[in-house]
Image: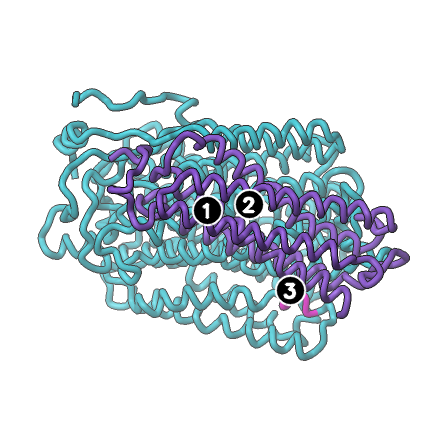
């Protein structure tokens, strides 16, 4: 065997289009999610500008409906979801000591499906108007909506939802089958645990969405009657199906953030996570209860006091495992040597903010009170406290924490702290007043309000806060740009990490671990450090490493569905057939071509090991 | 050993479908996928149960369903599950020609089922029960049609598998593929058992 490279390395664009490497796919998810985050943020800014004074005419009512629909849909499905998948891809295989995910090809497919779903949805702005039925797309609003906006919504979500589903299965199998020797379930880092539970929720929550979207599509494209009362349909079917998906979805979003917070708090308190097993149990319990509470979105529908009461109690029960988590983070910090790095600031800011969102959540879980809060700005304030104050703050903590691992350089701490304080203050300024706007009777999803109703000042403050959040986000992007121009290359372990992802040299080798590590306890890397070892104890000798081949097929499969979607939107069956043919033929090629991957030879691995800087 | 190599009786593992990490991953991943599929069909069943009496001016389930045809279709599909079990048995005994024989019988039975379903749907359309005639029509064709679509996909899948591997023995690469197809086929069969009960039997007496 020669010491020459055992495979041809692709370069530039082709490398990114064909990659099946989880680390690169993580970066792709981060960039695409960041892009959609900006779009969703701009939509939010336009809405806040429209609402900054009464009877404003910055945007028309129709445009406002499109903005609020696209803001919600984009932020949930095309910003928060991919950002979560970005960190799951970048971190989970490293944390469990694996060389890749279980299905690298499917991983790439999941990304491209998500990406083309997002592109499709956002093209609606340019092609006759965006969807305008709210991110929940309630029938009959969605079934009777004019134009093709809602068709873009249905097909964009359908395509990206398929990508999310295969991604969820991939991570479940990865975590069950690919753990390094000694990495038992109860030694897995908490982020991996939350990724595991979230993937389980994806597996069982996304199929109902798939069916709901199919029904909505059949209703709009093929004149079906699921939600049409004139022909025996029932609009409540959509609401049930949507929330049977939709409620687990919010736990899909929040759990990985909990995981990131757990890693950050433990690392920067220089302490083992307090109550690890209770944290694991709470994560699983939240995941389970997440499926039992969807009716709390429908209290005012009139399902009766018995149904409402059962779902109210189930909803309140979720506060218990969530409270367990909050106290465990506090106890982790208690007595720790706390380092207030930027990542830690986000984590510390997260805790009281998320608690406030949780408290309003319990308030909303009381059906009788919910009749007052329903569809008011109180609800808007609540879910932004849990989704921005919870999910996004957690993701920012994770971003500053894992950025060195993903990009081989750290983010500037000063700019990071400016980002934190502007965004954090801006966030509370935006959403805290909205609680009171809601209690004063301002309904959500309205494009304007009258003066003289005491709504002016609070709306004005809210808009100022939104601008502060925008400034904070701009600072983040400046920080990212600066980090690419200068070499901020620290050690391989800039935070004195506890888990396996920090035991790998810089830059992360293609195969992650030259030798699969032997895990000897919770916080595997910390265990070795405490024992005076420089790195992990290998579980195997240096040998040939099997790697998957890159492939363009995931991209082509996704393009096929993208093309077919246009055929469905514009009612052109030939285009549908062409698009589906592209996808099915790619699947056929994937099936019949023998692809055994390649091996990185032992000599190359040994060569790499010589140059290792830890 | 190269995973693409034909296995001999001497080196044949007890579970060829799970003998490699790839095989193990596929095996587990496919079971999980079927879990998701279960929820998918559960949603369709729930919708159907909510809308099955909403036939408006069209025929009701009692007037519509002809149990003899449906019974024949059921028998075809159940038998095809049995024949796919024989194929998997042959897989475990490294008898590739027997495996091919049983999968071809499975395929023929599946195609027979599909033919009956198409015939049945055409009859219903004649009687005024269409996809757009009522909420019952939409729910019926979506649920039963999704199942039929799964059968059709399964037929394409096994055709591809058989042709591609016709002259190859059982290997560690294709053993999981055969096995997964059989799993899928059983799942589709189980869904049909529920459709037969919930849609047809309950439609006659429920």
Q: Distance between the residues labelled 1 and 2?
A: 9 Å
Whole-percent x, y for residue A395 in the image = 43, 49
Which chain is mark 1 on? B
Q: Which residue corresponds to mark 2?
A: B106
Which residue is drawn at the image coordinates 46% and 53% (left, top)? Answer: B32
Q: Which residue is rendered at x = 30% and y = 54% of the image? A: A340
Label 2, secondary structure: give it: helix
Q: Residue A297 carries which label?
A: 3
Does the CB distance between marks 1 and 2 fall below 8 Å? yes
Q: Mark 1 points at which residue?
A: B87
Instruction: Report which colour depicts chain A.
Output: cyan
Report, in whole angstroms, how far the alpha carbon at label 3 lies from the one at label 2: 46 Å
Q: Mark 2 lies on which chain?
A: B
Chain B visual colour: purple
Rendering coords of residue A112 (x, y %): 51, 35
Q: Give the range drawn in magenta.
A: A295-299
Above/below status of A278 relative to A495: below
């Amino acid at each position: 065997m020669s010491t020459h490279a055992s495979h041809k390395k692709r370069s530039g664009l082709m490398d990114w289009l064909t990659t099946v490497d989880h680390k690169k796919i993580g970066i792709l998810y981060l960039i695409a999610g960041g892009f959609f985050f900006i779009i969703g943020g701009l939509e939010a800014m336009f809405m806040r500008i429209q609402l900054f004074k009464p009877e404003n005419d910055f945007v028309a009512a129709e445009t406002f409906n499109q903005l609020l629909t696209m803001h919600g849909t984009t932020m949930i499905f095309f910003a928060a979801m991919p950002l979560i998948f970005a960190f799951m891809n970048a971190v989970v295989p490293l944390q469990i000591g694996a060389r890749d995910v279980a299905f690298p090809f499917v991983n790439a497919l999941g990304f491209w499906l998500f990406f083309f779903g997002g592109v499709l949805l956002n093209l609606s702005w340019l092609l006759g108007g965006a969807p305008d039925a709210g991110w929940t797309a309630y029938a009959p609003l969605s079934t009777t909506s004019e134009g093709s906006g809602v068709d873009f919504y249905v097909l964009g979500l359908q395509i990206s939802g398929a990508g999310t589903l295969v991604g969820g299965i991939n991570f479940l199998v990865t975590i069950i089958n690919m753990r390094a020797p000694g990495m038992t379930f109860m030694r897995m880092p908490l982020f991996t645990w939350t990724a595991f539970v979230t993937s389980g929720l994806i597996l069982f929550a996304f199929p109902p969405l798939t069916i709901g979207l199919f029904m909505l599509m059949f209703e709009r494209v093929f004149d079906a009657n699921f939600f049409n009362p004139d022909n025996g349909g029932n609009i409540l079917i959509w609401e049930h199906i949507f929330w049977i998906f939709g409620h687990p979805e919010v736990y899909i979003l929040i759990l990985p953030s909990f995981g990131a917070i757990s890693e950050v708090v433990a690392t920067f308190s220089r302490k083992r996570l307090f109550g690890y097993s209770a944290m694991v149990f709470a994560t699983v319990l939240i995941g389970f209860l997440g499926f039992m509470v969807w009716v709390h979105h429908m209290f005012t529908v009139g399902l009766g006091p018995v149904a409402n009461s059962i779902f109210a109690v189930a909803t309140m029960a979720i506060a218990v495992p969530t409270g367990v988590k909050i106290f465990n983070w506090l106890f982790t910090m208690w007595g720790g040597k706390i380092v207030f790095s930027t990542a830690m600031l986000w984590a510390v800011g997260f805790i009281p903010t998320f608690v406030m969102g949780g408290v309003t959540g319990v308030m909303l879980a009381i059906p009788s009170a919910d009749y007052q809060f329903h569809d008011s700005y109180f609800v808007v304030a609540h879910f932004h406290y849990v989704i921005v104050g919870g999910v996004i703050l957690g993701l920012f903590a994770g971003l500053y924490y894992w950025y060195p691992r993903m990009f081989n350089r750290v983010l500037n701490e000063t700019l990071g702290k400016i980002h934190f304080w502007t965004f954090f203050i801006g966030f509370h300024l935006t959403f805290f007043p909205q609680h009171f706007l809601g209690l004063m009777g301002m309904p959500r999803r309205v494009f304007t309000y009258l003066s003289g109703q005491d709504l002016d000042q609070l709306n004005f403050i809210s808009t100022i806060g939104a601008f502060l959040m925008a400034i904070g986000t701009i600072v983040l992007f400046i920080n990212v740009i600066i980090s690419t121009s200068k070499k901020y290359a620290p050690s391989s372990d800039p935070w004195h990490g506890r888990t396996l992802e920090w035991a790998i040299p810089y830059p992360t080798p293609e195969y992650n671990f030259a030798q699969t590590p032997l895990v000897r306890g919770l916080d595997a890397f910390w265990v070795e450090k405490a024992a005076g070892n420089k790195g992990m104890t290998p579980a195997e000798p240096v040998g040939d490493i099997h790697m998957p081949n890159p492939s363009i097929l995931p991209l082509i499969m996704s393009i096929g569905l993208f093309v077919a979607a246009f055929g469905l939107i514009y009612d052109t069956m030939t285009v549908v057939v062409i698009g589906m043919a592209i996808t099915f033929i790619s699947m056929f090629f994937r099936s019949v071509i023998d692809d055994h991957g390649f091996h990185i030879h032992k000599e190359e691995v040994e060569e790499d090991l010589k140059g290792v800087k830890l | 050993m190269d995973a693409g190599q034909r296995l001999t009786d001497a080196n044949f593992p007890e579970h060829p479908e799970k003998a490699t990490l790839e095989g193990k991953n596929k095996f587990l991943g496919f079971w999980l996928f079927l879990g998701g599929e279960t929820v998918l069909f559960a949603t369709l069943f729930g919708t159907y149960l909510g809308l099955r009496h909403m036939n408006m001016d069209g025929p009701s389930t009692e007037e519509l369903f002809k149990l003899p045809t449906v019974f024949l279709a059921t028998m075809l599909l159940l038998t095809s599950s049995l024949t796919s079990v024989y194929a998997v048995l042959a897989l475990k005994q490294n008898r590739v020609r027997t495996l091919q024989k049983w999968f071809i019988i499975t395929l023929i039975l599946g195609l027979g089922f599909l033919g009956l379903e198409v015939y049945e749907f055409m009859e219903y359309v004649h009687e005024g029960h269409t996809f757009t005639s009522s909420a019952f029509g939409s729910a019926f064709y979506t649920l039963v049609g999704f199942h039929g679509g799964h059968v059709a996909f399964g037929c394409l899948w096994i055709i591809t598998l058989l042709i591609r591997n016709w002259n190859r023995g059982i290997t560690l690469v294709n053993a999981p593929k055969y096995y997964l197809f059989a799993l899928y086929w059983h799942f589709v069969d189980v869904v049909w058992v529920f459709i037969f009960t919930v849609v047809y039997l309950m439609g006659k007496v429920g």
